[in-house]
Every structure is written in C-alpha cells, then in structure tokens.
Image (spheres, rainbow, N blue to C red):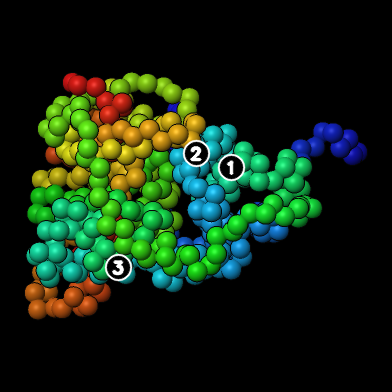
Amino acid sequence: MDGVHDMGGMHGFGSVPVNDQGRPFPEPWEGRVFATNLALTVALGANLDRFRFLAESMPPVAYLSSSYYERWLASMLSAVAEQGLLSGDQLAAIDAGHVPEVEPAGAEALPPEIVQVLVDAPTGYQRDLGGKAAFQSRDRVRARTRHSAGHTRLPRYVRGRCGEIISDNGNQHLPDTRAETGDITMQRLYTVRFMATELWGEQANPRDSVCLDLWESYLEPA
Amino acid sequence: MAHSHDDHHKVPADVALRVKALETALTRRGYINPDTLEAIIDTYEHKVGPQNGARVIARAWNDPDFKSRLLDNASSAVGELGFGGIIEGTDVTVVENRPGLHNMVVCTLCSCYPWALLGLPPGWYKSFAYRSRAVSEPRSVLAEFGVELSPDVEVRVWDSTAELRYLVMPQRPEGTEDQDEAALAQLVTRNGMIGTALL
C-alpha cells in the first residue's frame, strides 16, 4: 500500500539522530512488546508479512506519531483481534489499561528453553535455485508501476525506474500474497541495482547506486 | 461547564499499563509464558549484539578462505561461528567495502536489520530521517555521522526490502597486520557494519 511507511526519498524528517544509540529497550514495556510478539508469532506460526501490513495499515497520523514499539504494539493488537485470541470487549478493557476476565484457551505457550535454540541454531540456509528464472544477472529491468492497496515490498521510489539484475536469490515466498491470505507463493527474488541518477535525477552523484531485493512479479524487461 | 460524556473520545491508558494488561490476559489464556518473555529479553539485551558481527568480520580479515566463503554464502559461513538461528536474518549477505566502494544498509519500509549478527537496531537506524534519506541523499546522511567520502567513491546503498539481511565488511584498518582475531574484533563497530562509520 502507498502509505507513510514507504519513506524512501521523503523530505522533512530532519537530521538523523546519530547519538540515539540506545539499549535495545530503553523502556521495560518495549522489551515486553518485543518478547510477547516474538513468543506469540513463533508459537502460533509467524506471518511477518501480515504483521508488517497491520503496522502499515495504521492511520498515517498514528503511524508517524508512534514510536517503533508503539507501532509493534498496534500491529500485535490487530493480529490478536484478527486471530480471535482475545475478544473485542477484552481488547477494549486492555486499551483502558484493565486486565479483562479471560478463560484459558488450552493453548501451548512457547517454553523458555526454546529461545536459545531459536537464536543459536545455525541453519546452514541454502537458497532454492530450482525452476526457471525469467531474468539473469546483468539483465536490464524496469520496476512495474502499480498501486496496490495491499501489502507490497516494492517501494514507490523505484516504480517505473530501470535497473540491472545483480543477483538471483532463488525462490522466496511473495510477501504480497502471504500478508493478504497467509498463502505461500514462491517466486524468484532478485537483487536489482538502480543508479542514483535514475532514481533522483542529476543532483545525485553519478557513481552512486541503490540496490533492492525485488520479486519477479515486481519487474518487467526493460 | 462540563461537556457531556458523549463528546469525549476514550483516551487509551498509558502504554506500559496497556502492555501489562495484554501480557497478563495472554498469559492467562495460555498463549505466552512470562519466563519465555524474560528469556527473549535477556537474549537480546545481553547475548546477541554487534560483538557477533564483529567476530565474523575479524575472522574474515584474518582468514582469506573464510572471507571467500563468507562473501559467497554468508548464511552458511556465519554458522561456522555458531551464528544464525531462525528468528531474523537467516539469509545473510555480506557486502565488502574496498577502495572506491562504500556500502551502507537501510530498510526504508520498516527497520529490517541483521538481528543475528548485530542484535536489535539502534534508535537512529529506526528513525524516519534515516529511513527516508539514506537512499536519496546517502552522502549527507554519512556526513552527519562524520563520514566524508570523496565524490570518486561509489556509495552503494542496500535497501532491505526482502528477507535478505545485509552486513557491511569494513576495510581493515591499516597497521593491524599483526593483530589476532580477538584484537581485530575489538576494532569492528556496529556503525561500521551498517556502513555509517569508517574504521
């Protein structure tokens, strides 16, 4: 969706707060939001794309005036409601800061000893390069111009712009469909390099470039 | 004179209070275990951080075979040091700075970041200013970090739009030829591995 989250190239946000190095969770509640979300999504089957879409679906004013973990909280509350983990009345009580009456759901929470396994296990991840790729390295491509109201990882600032394929990253699930339906659609993912002058005009340094990871359906031959 | 109650929006409670209420309700439902939350918080506050990425970079500087495996398939190579996991950053790509090329990493759409190697992102990485400007004016962003690059150096910005996570391999500082891996790892900073600092 063409929301305020799609920030690449926007003006007006001022200088970068370079001294905001911060601990991971300056406020204790931020750690609780992070951990609750992680534990829930692992236990219930994570749909990170849906999670991102729910954050993007916040009203723009709310998105811009919320901190990072406030946006996580908003997204998590939407997911809890969608999945029916808590009722509307229960969520309204939480919104007012009260603990609602709840019945045990017979669910199985993620046990603490799993955490280390999830974080440590070297996965030896290998890309899936099976099937046919429409594009090869060094092919010229154009990012499609489309304005989907749903989730997409095709930022506005590259749409309609031409770049060059620099790598084929194999088949990866398309976030657009997973965010919408939960279904896994595998599709080729490429890294595409765009010259900065193509994206930003003559003010850019002609040597500079921006690389993005874009799915095959985001691209057309150029 | 008092307004009628109907005129008032309900004001949400303080965020810490809402989070506590949510956590309690989900715990009583059986969906989460508070001990697990403690374990997750402890992990990301104390165990996973830039020291992981620094070990990877130091190893690569000192071991050309490892460096070549790392640049070829970082996901597999970082497993040699026991890093990886399935939480975030399973598919990692390391991009190498060299004379004439400077890499930097951003996520314009949210704040994707190689958690497994760097821990959770600092505030500036999540800021709207960095997300909006890193792709369109990387040199002025770098200048705010005190990094001035010659116009002859290419700045290549990696916008993390998919599940690939990028880590920058900074150039090895001069005069460190005799240093061992542990000493080298001390030189590698978080900002260096995002590309907003030179070493």
Q: Secondary structure at mark 1?
A: helix
Q: CA distance from mark 3 to mark 1?
A: 33 Å
Secondary structure type for disc 3: loop
- Left or right of A36? Residue A22 is left
Residue A140, above or below A69: above
User: Looking at numbered disc 2 in the image, what kind of residue is underneath it?
Assistant: Arg
Q: Amino acid at mark 3?
A: Gly
Q: Position of residue A221 (x, y in %)?
A: 19, 21
Residue behind mark 2 = A50
Residue, disc 3? B82
Mark nearer the N terminus (2 vs 1): 2
Task: Classify mark 1: residues with Cα within 10 Å, few (<14), some (14-19) or many (20+).
Answer: many
The quarter holding residue B17 reads: bottom right
Q: Position of residue A222 (x, y in %)?
A: 18, 21
Residue visible at 49% across and 47% down in the picture: A46
Inspect the image, locate mark 1, and give the three-letter code of the amino acid beneath it. Answer: Ala
Mark 3 is surrounded, within 10 Å at the Cα level, by few (under 14), some (14 to 19) or many (20 or more) other residues, namely some
